[in-house]
Amino acid sequence: MIPVTEFRQFTEQQPAFRVLKPWWDVFTDYLSVIMLMIGVFGCTLQVMQDKIICLPQRTAPPPPPPPPNHTAAIFPNQSQPAAAALQPTSPTSVPSVPGGGGVQEMRGLKTNLDWQQYSFINQMCYEKALHWYAKYFPYLVIIHTVIFMVCSNFWFKFPGSSSKIEHFISILGKCFDSPWTTRALSEVSGENSDREREPQKKHPAPSSRPVASIVIGGGGGGPGGDGPSSNLVKTSSLRSIPEKIVVDKPPAATTNVLDKKEGEQAKALFEKVKKFRLHVEEGDLLYVMYVRQTILKVLKFILIISYNSFLVSKVQITVACNVDIQNMTGYRYFSCNHTMAHLFSKLSYCYLCFVVVYGLTCLYTSYWLFYRSLKEYSFEYVRQETGISDIPDVKNDFAFMLHMIDQYDPLYSKRFAVFLSEVSENKLKQLNLNHAWTAEKLRQRLQTNTSNRLELQLFMLSGLPDTIFELSELQSLKLEIINNVTIPPAIAQLEDLQELSLYQCSLKVHTAAISFLKENLKVLRVKFDDARELPHWLYLLRNLEELHLTGSLCLDAAKNITLETMRELKSLKTLMLKSNLSKVPQAIVDVSSHLQKLYVYNDGSKLLMLNNLKKMVNLTELELVHCDLERIPHAIFSLVNLQALDLKENNLRSIEEIVSFQHLRKLTCLKLWHNSVSQIPEHIKKLGSLERLYFCYNKIEILPSHLFLCNKLRYLDLSNNDIRFIPPEVGVLQSLQYFSVACNKIENLPDELFFCKKLKILKLGNNTLSVLSPKISYLVLLTHLELKGNHFETLPAELGVCRLLKRTGLAAEDALFETLPSDVKEQMKAE
């Protein structure tokens, strides 16, 4: 007999694939096995048993049937040999039995055929007379059953679909068994149980309901248990899935569920699920293949029922045979007995019954496929059960596989959904982040910044560690390239926090955290790539004193910088805009009444329409850097409280408007460096309040004597120009402490320069000087002297009088330093 296991290859598949086999596929698999056994049993009988037995007939019509006490036929396989038979026309009489009443005569057809002739007749009649259905019925059963088996499992074998299924099953199993899944659902269940605890006390649930029955109900695979709508009905059963049991454990049991390795594995799972979703949602190959194989099975069912119902009556016990073999047997007409007709008839009816059940199951499958929207899958019931509201709905093959999973057990999709949620992913990232950045490690990174605040800088992290809120001494927090982070209410623990820097960070701030920042934050720095990245909550920081915004802005975005909400920034004193503005935003006028410092760094874009500056009457510092200005803006002359003006890196060629600066009586610092100024006008002398003047990196050739009438100058920088001569009027600057004429073409120094006895820093490098006057000894407060790049041969010994000048403060070649007397050198080397 042929063992059924030989056909296992048609249905063989990975055991893990059973989760994608709904109840109807499992049921039809069992039906297929039964039908296969029917076919194998019939084939075995065909091989091992005689198929047909035939006897010759007279050419004339057969005589009437003999009486019951006579024999009906003489069979070729009797114990008597066929050669002993008599001639057909000579009947034989049998002697009377002793004691009998007379002679009993045997009737029947007598032949002289041998065993080989009977065998030949049987084979010929089997091939010619027996109906094909009666001959091949078992083989048809096997063929049809094998086709059913192949159709049911083809989508597991086809390369395009099997790869997706294998990948999905692999990820599904890891997601189901991941400790993070249990922890995430346990936390949510704990929250739900806390909400329900009070109602349960008032209306206690029956305690007799067994947990086992609830779990079984949640994993049903009946016809009504698929899809989102039916799962919503199963809310009570899903809510009792074992994750809820974990909630009753002490909190310590869940806080350390994940170690570092498990956290990394869960993180990798999130990435796999994201990539798999992008890949699978692109098409519907699995759905199409399953629909096609189901339709093929339905058509096959209709075909089998159609022809089997008609041909099953052709399986008859008695078969008339008419074959032209007289030359070999002497007979043409035969009467045959199909020995397995009765059994085959019963097997065929049994087979048809199983095919009918199989077909009805396939029809239900077709109804399920076309009645339900299987290309879309909603996690609504999971969102309701878990409270994780951001689990996205899926489509195409991803949705179809989840619908199939629900037929096996809805718990799989519930646990799998945890890895589709960004909220869940962020919680995992937060857990891993807290493992990596402990409070001790963060405390080691604390530094004091330029504002003398204790600062912590975090760069390119996946989030904000919760451990940061344990650093109560933190005063400044600097975050760089950190995205999708929410600042929690726990920031209120940082009572000393006053400064926050966000460089290319997309953050969300909890409402409670905004309230804290609104009261405590003094300095905010934001660097962005897109104006939409600007946090809207910054306009609510009513105690903010400094605001620094750096990023590319179009004109419309420039208008929206304030959104007319800067009126709420009533404490704002310093505003820095580093962008590509074409004009000063009109909305800055909202804070013009109390704004004291305005810095505009324009990245080379031409800044026009500066009339708004007139309204900022309280400005004390103004910087218009790299704004492509060709003239000094007239609006500046109205800023009567201005103390410092910086016009660095513009395109100024003429500064005749400087005469209007005489109205700015508080102006003490003027920076016109990095421009194209070639001449200093005489009106410079009217700026009597100037203390710091920057003319470096211009094209000045002649220094007017009127420049030195600004006798309050303490800092004068004329380096990197084309100056050849320093007027002796430089001696008027008795308050001068810093003087630089480095990188010019000066050949001689006037002796009057050394009358500026308060000089501490003198830079003469990269000129054409050849002699340093011994009057350098007048500069007793000198601490830094730059002489490199000149033509000096020796240095005067009088440098020894400048006792504050040390070797580290003397920028000169080593060979030139060696020309000093040894005692002077020792003095300068001594600390």
Image (tube, helix red, strand yellow):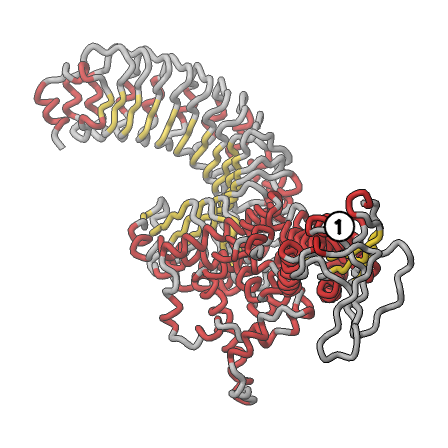
Q: Identify the residue shown where x is 30% and y is 19%.
A: 764
Residue at which label 1 appears: 121
Instruction: Name the residue nearer the viewer: 546 or 632.
Output: 546
As displayed, is residue 779 above or below residue 563? above
- Whether residue 359 is visible to the viewer of this picture, yes or no, is no
Which quarter of the figure has residue 60?
A: bottom right
Instruction: Name the residue nearer the viewer: 580 or 343.
Output: 343
Q: Identify the residue shown where x is 36% and y is 65%.
A: 256
As displayed, is residue 37 above or below residue 637? below
Q: How many marks?
A: 1
Q: Residue 213 appears at what percent x and percent y?
A: 55, 79
Q: Identify the residue shown where x is 63% and y is 47%.
A: 560
Which quarter of the figure has residue 399?
A: bottom right
Q: In which quarter of the image is the C terminus?
A: top left
Give the amino acid type for the residue marked by disc 1 in the picture.
Answer: Ile
Q: In which quarter of the image is the N terminus?
A: bottom right
Q: In this view, does 33 lie to the left or right of 490?
A: right
Q: Residue 533 appears at what percent x and percent y?
A: 57, 47
Q: Residue 98 appears at what percent x and percent y?
A: 71, 77
In the structure shown, which secondary structural element does the residue marked by tag 1 occupy?
helix
As displayed, is residue 164 above or below residue 519? above
Instruction: Name the residue nearer the viewer: 55 or 270.
Output: 55
